Image (cartoon, helix red, strand yellow):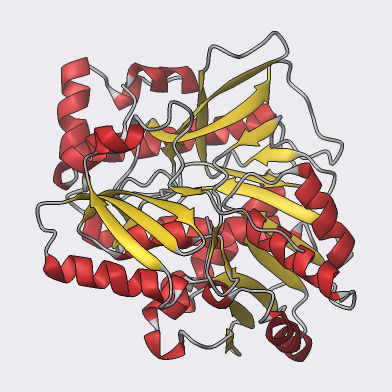
Amino acid sequence: MSVDLNFRDFFHPVSILKLRRFLEKSQWFSQEKLQRYQLNRLRVILSHAYENVPYYRSLFSELQFNPQDVTSLDDLKKIPILTKDIVRKNFNILIARNAKSFNPVLTRTSGTSGESVEFYLDRPSNILEFCYYWRYWSWAGYRIGDTFAEFGNFYFLTHREDIHKIHHFNPFTKRLILNGILFSYENIDKYIEVIDKHKPLFLKGLASTLYIFALFLKKRGQSNLSFKAVFSTGEMLIESQRAVIEEVFQCKVFDSYGHMERTVAISECPNGGYHINLEYGIMEIEQQKNSNEESRIGRIIGTSLHNFSMPLLRYDVGDLVEIKKESIYCSCKRGLPLIGKIHGRQEDSVITPDGRVLTSIYMIFELVEDIEFGQIIQKDKNRLVLRIVKKESYSAESETKLLSIVRDFVGDIMKIDIDYTNIEEIKKQDSHKFRVVVSNCKWDMN
């Protein structure tokens, strides 16, 4: 989950400042007061869904569910869970009839599940996202205007003229984007040079990217790069990775969890507590069998409290989280409740023949609209297999686009095979948690 701080999409100063002031205060509210806020927001979003969203109008009528009768957060459980498959099959009737008044933007993500999902985000959810990150990053000392570095690929894939550049710097937002496609030990001096030039106070990236970057710097003997804080996101952060990152960059790592559909946000405070941001959305846990007396592990079910163009109610996010059964308060004194651990997906990296380490190649499935489902398997250092489930709209042009984007990542040497298959064949190959990237090619520092 990320926010680009793109002022064209996020710049609504009056609304931002109002919500920002509220979030600064609300983090210190009691959990009871925060839950009352959630309940008030939930009533608003449920009434809006009933009045304006055909899917929910029909569902609520069938269930004889009246938003006006909602008196507690538990009443939300009267609504069935919304799966990604339901969203795909009912996309048009999940859009609010008055969506245009909220400035909707069509968004598409495969996430790390490999399954394509489309949805709308809007002005209220953009304002929420901006203010959430502003508050979360401020826990580490961030202030608007501070130079901020981030490993990313999306900018370079959508600005093809810059795809061979190590970085892009926006002097207006002070955002330094480091090109993850070119990430390799051989290029490490180029990354060091650009970081030294712009002197960002903060660094953000996938846990695996940050970890590998730190290992590269250790191998090189580079110890001069330091930050005020490092932000890890998008993958489960292993404690051994955290230790290396903090050692190399001489600062604390702040870990977080989120997803593009914006129903749930979890962020780590300076005292190490993983806080559920109750103002962001409502998080439920579908308990798993392997839960024990002290904690419960389950799938995250999220409800958006700020997206009016396409509200997602009891949305099955698909990732796992662990929550202590006994309520525990953080020593930071914030009222935002804690979780135990994030059991999110941890993807393998793809190692290119020229030694680059690609940690977010899964995003190719976000860039080719005609793919229903996909998986990337690295057989060896010189061979990549793309397992693809096609949409009906998939064509020869789609394949050409797919191969072009993959080549942008891996270069010209690697052999690329495409295996057109179906979802059932892809999923049954692994009885454990599905990984969109599976690599049989292990990298080392020797």
Outermost residue on the top side: it is: 293
Task: Answer yes or no: is residue 377 visible.
Answer: yes
Residue at image position (76%, 50%) is 241
Residue at image position (66%, 65%) is 204
Please state if 332 lies on the left or on the right of 104 as rendered: right
Query: Which one is in front, 252 or 276?
Result: 252
Classify residue 218 by image quadrant.
bottom right
Query: Which one is in front, 24 or 239?
Result: 239
In the image, residue 377 above or below residue 182 = above
Residue at image position (43%, 47%) is 436
Residue at image position (26%, 32%) is 424
**Image coords of residue 74 (percent x, y):** 47, 18
**Image coords of residue 282 (percent x, y):** 50, 34
Q: Quadrant of the C terminus?
A: bottom right
Task: Answer yes or no: is residue 8 visible.
Answer: no
**Image coords of residue 12 (percent x, y):** 47, 71
